[in-house]
Amino acid sequence: MLGFFRAQIELNVPAIGGKDSASGTFKMQDGKLIHVPTTLIAIANSPQDSAKIVSAEFQDARDKKVVYFPFPRDENGLPEWDAYRDILSEVRQLHDAGKVASSSVVEEGGVAASITKMCFGNRIGFVFNE
C-alpha cells in the first residue's frame, strides 16, 4: 500500500479506487474461521481519445524500430523517480508525434518474451540486430 501511495505522490496522479484486505480472517455464521490472504486491488482509469490508443501487437511488417526503455532503479531496487518521469515524458512526446505504433511493458521473461507476444497479435515476425 505504501508503494502505491509513493507512486501516486511521485507521479502526481490520484487514486481512482480500490480495496484492501489486511485482515485475513473472517468468522462465518457457523463459527468456522476462514483465512484469506492479504489482498490489494487497484482500479485505475485513464480517459483518452480512442483514436490515440495503441495496442501491444505489431501493426505491420514495414521496417520499424523497437525501443526499449529500462525501468531505472536505485541500489535498493527502488524506482529512480526523476529518471522514470523523464522516460514517461519522452514516451508521451513520441506517442503524441505519432511515432508509437504499438507499446508493451516488459514483464516476466524479459525483452524477448515481450517481443514474442507483440509478434503473435498480427502474426508479424521480428529480427533482433546486434
Image (cartoon, rainbow, N blue to C red):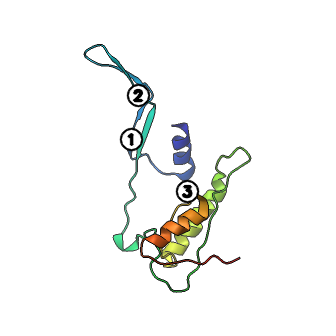
User: Which residue is the extreme one toward the left?
Assistant: 29
Q: Position of residue 108 (x, y in %)?
A: 56, 54
The three-letter amino acid code for the residue at tag 3 is Glu
The label number, if any, that marks residue 18 in the structure image: 1
- Pointer 1 or 2: first along the chain: 1
Badge 2 marks a residue whose secondary structure is: loop
Q: Is residue 4 above or below residue 127?
A: above
User: Which residue is the extreme one toward the right?
Assistant: 75
User: In the picture provided, is 80 more to the left or to the right than 109?
Assistant: right
Residue named by callout 3: 107
- Closer-to-camera residue (5/128): 128
Alpha-carbon distance for marks 3 and 1?
23 Å
User: In the picture provided, is 19 more to the left or to the right than 13?
Assistant: left
The answer to whether residue 103 is seen in the rendering is no
User: Which residue is the extreme one toward the top?
Assistant: 31
Residue named by callout 2: 36
- Pointer 3 or 1: first along the chain: 1
- Closer-to-camera residue (30/23): 30
Q: Position of residue 102 (x, y in %)?
A: 48, 72
Q: Give me the residue at 62% from left, 68% from top.
A: 68
Among the 4 quarters of the image, the one containing residue 22 = top left
Alpha-carbon distance for marks 1 and 2?
17 Å
The label number, if any, that marks residue 97 in the structure image: none
- Pointer 3 or 2: first along the chain: 2
**In front: mark 3 or mark 1?**
3
